[in-house]
Amino acid sequence: MKVNEKAKEYMRTEARSNVLATTDKGGKVNLAVFGSLALADDETVIVMLGENRTYANLRENPYASCLVTLVGKTGMQQEGCRLYLKVRSVEDAGKTFDVMKEEVRKRVGDAAEMLKHLVRFDIEEVRPILDMGQGI
């Protein structure tokens, strides 16, 4: 699914929060905040991961959801979108991996060394945070 211009705007806003939800094969849910989440193209989201619960869950279950919210908005004024995702691929090296890791390193320094995997997700659906039939 291609994301529309409004969703692209949310994904390109620096002052945003990205909460990624994953589940293991038994349905146990994990939520995590990721600053490395990015829109690679109109149909793809990428994120850098370490050896963490999110990565372990995605190895068992390729589906995830991401809540993208703009900082400073609350309640019924909350802006952002919900992304419904499926893992397309995992890369542990390569040009995109190196570029993304360097971008993260600029923000967090040596903490970027914990990042071992670049996950590419297909965007399966996009919805507004507050869905009142307005679409996104």
Image (spheres, helix red, strand yellow):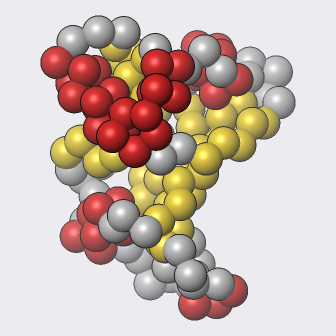
Question: Residue 19, how many percent across, how many down?
Answer: 60, 51
Instruction: Give the residue furthest to the bottom.
Output: 77
The residue at the point 23 percent across, 42 percent down is 40
Can you give x and y, in whole percent of width and height, for residue 68 in the image?
50, 61
The one nearer the camera, 84 or 48, is 48
- Name which quarter of the figure residue 7 lies in: bottom left
Q: In the picture, which quadrant includes the C terminus?
A: bottom left
- Most foreground residue, 80 or 25: 80
* Residue sitting at x 22%, y 70%: 5
User: Left or right of 28: which side holds 84?
Assistant: left
Is any atom of residue 12 visible in this view? Answer: yes
Residue appearing at x 46%, y 19% in the figure: 113
The quadrant in which residue 102 appears is: top left
Compared to residue 127, the image places residue 103 above or below, namely: above
- Residue for point 71% across, 30% down: 23
In this rendering, the count of numbered labels is: 0
Residue extending furthest toward the top: 93
Q: In the displayed structure, does residue 67 sit left or right of residue 13?
A: right
Q: Nearer the viewer, residue 30 or 34?
A: 34
Decide if residue 92 is on the left or right side of residue 113: left
Above-or-below relation of 74 to 102: below
Q: Considering only vertical position in the picture, is 92 above or below 132?
A: above
Q: Quadrant of residue 119?
A: top left
The location of residue 127, given as percent across then percent down, is: 47, 65
> Is 59 situated left or right of 96 in this image?
right
